[in-house]
Amino acid sequence: MDVKIKFLGAARSVTGSKYLVEAGRQKILLDCGLFQGQKALRLRNWDKLPIDPAEIHTVVITHAHIDHIGYLPRLVKDGFSGKIICTAATEDLMKIMLMDAAKLQEEEALFAFKRGYSKHSRPEPLFNSGDAKAVLSLVDSHVFKKDIFIAPNMLVRFYNAGHILGAAIVEMKIEGEKETKSIVFSGDLGRYQDPIMYDPESLPQADVLVIESTYGNKLNPQTDVEEQLIQIVREAYNNNGALLIPAFALGRTQSLLYYFNKLMSAGAIPLLPIYIDSPMAINVTDLYERHGSLHKITVTRQGTQLVSIFDSPNIHYCHSRESSKALNEIRKPIIIISASGMATGGRILHHLYHRLPREADTILFAGFQAEGSRGRDILEGEKSIKMFGEQVPVKCNVREVYGLSAHADQSELMRWINQFDHAPKKTFVTHGELESALAFARLLEQKKGWKTEVPEYLESSVLFEGI
């Protein structure tokens, strides 16, 4: 039996994770993400897959970020009907993430129609809420470190990746007639000594390794995160302006709440009202309390309620559109955390629309901004940003905090790599922009002597012959 892999996403880019593994007659898709960022990448979401979704036997999901799960509704819409395997926390998060993504798709199509800025006479969403619901009926979730047989001769096992709630490293074992081989997919690796998440787990060996390289060419120390936030919050406070933070609803929002709670409790920054303006972030934060064993934040039970730092009295959750819009009228020091993290959609857009032109306000970026995203354009000093079909001037203060990423940096990727007893037969460096992926591949070759490849989009490779 031959085993092959085809890179349907996250190849020389940091989004759209999809790896098709073919082992004999079995076709397994590892992750099923949406492309984000540059228009050329986003257009791939509309391309026909080079495989009929109905031929895919099983989808295995590493974690619930949209660039790893966001294409699932389209896959199901186009004919996939097999099992979707993931961890229990990932299943809970998927219910939130996919329904939110579908809603955004529907709203964006409707808005484009009303404003007339689409080239299509009747813009259609990539998928709708019905498609997202259809995904959830196929999900089969499991605990970490359990053998999950996805075929008579194939099993997968999840290990804690430390990236976000439920994030997993996936070990896939394939039993052939002559021998058994293993493929390890790192998924997105978390950080060591993270204040909230546990360290990524170690694996001793892999015949083939597929490893992410988001920060494969960067060091991203966590040591001065608190000092950076102190300076930025004090500056915004002294300007008598709002601090607006585009933040991923899953992971980044909760990290920011952790730091702000700690700094305010210590008196290092003023006690300010914090508004969480993302329905998804609100629901995700509840899951941190439900899955308390997967992170370091203390969760206690008071009667029938689970309670944590996320229930602090100065933290306010905007459940309605009206409460969200009301924030735009506030012209005093407050903190607003809203999604999406790269300013590609969601409620953050109308906050940016109102606050980018205000000189007293501050926009703080607290995470990776992909090429082509509004966040990257603002960070790189664009004088105006196109939103809702018009150019919005950027007159506010623009700041960035480093070290908050949930992705391992170069040194931490190497620390995880060093766990292996011996070199894999092949190592594929993926999920990184080209410069980052190439830099990390060179580092592995120089420091470890490993054979590496940086695959191109839609490239195929034979992993094992005649096993």
Image (cartoon, rainbow, N blue to C red):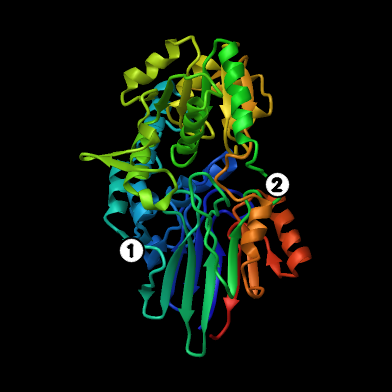
Q: Is residue 405 left or right of residue 56?
A: right
Picture coordinates of residue 381, whole percent (x, y): 68, 24
Q: Are marks 1 and 2 in contact (CB under 8 Å)?
A: no
Asked whether 456 or 340 is in front, the reply is 340
The residue labelled by disc 1 is 83
Q: Is residue 357 visible?
A: no
Q: Is residue 334 left or right of residue 310?
A: right
User: The disc labelled 2 sits on which kind of residue?
Assistant: Lys
Vertical comparison of 402 with 35: above or below: above
The residue mark sitting in front, 1 or 2, is: 2
Residue found at x 54% / y 73%: 4
Asked whether 434 or 200 is in front, the reply is 200
CA separation in Å, label 1 and label 2:
37 Å
Vertical comparison of 389 with 205: above or below: above
Q: Residue furthest bottom?
A: 178
Picture coordinates of residue 27, whole percent (x, y): 44, 70
Q: Residue 145: which quarter of the image?
A: bottom left
Badge 2 density bin: few <14, some 14–19, many ≥20, Cα 10 Å: some
Q: Residue furthest right?
A: 446
Question: Quick one: SS at disc 1?
Answer: strand
Q: Is residue 258 left or right of residue 110?
A: right
Badge 1 density bin: few <14, some 14–19, many ≥20, Cα 10 Å: some
User: The disc labelled 1 sits on which kind of residue?
Assistant: Lys
Can you tell which mark lies on residue 218? 2
Q: Residue 297: which quarter of the image?
A: top left
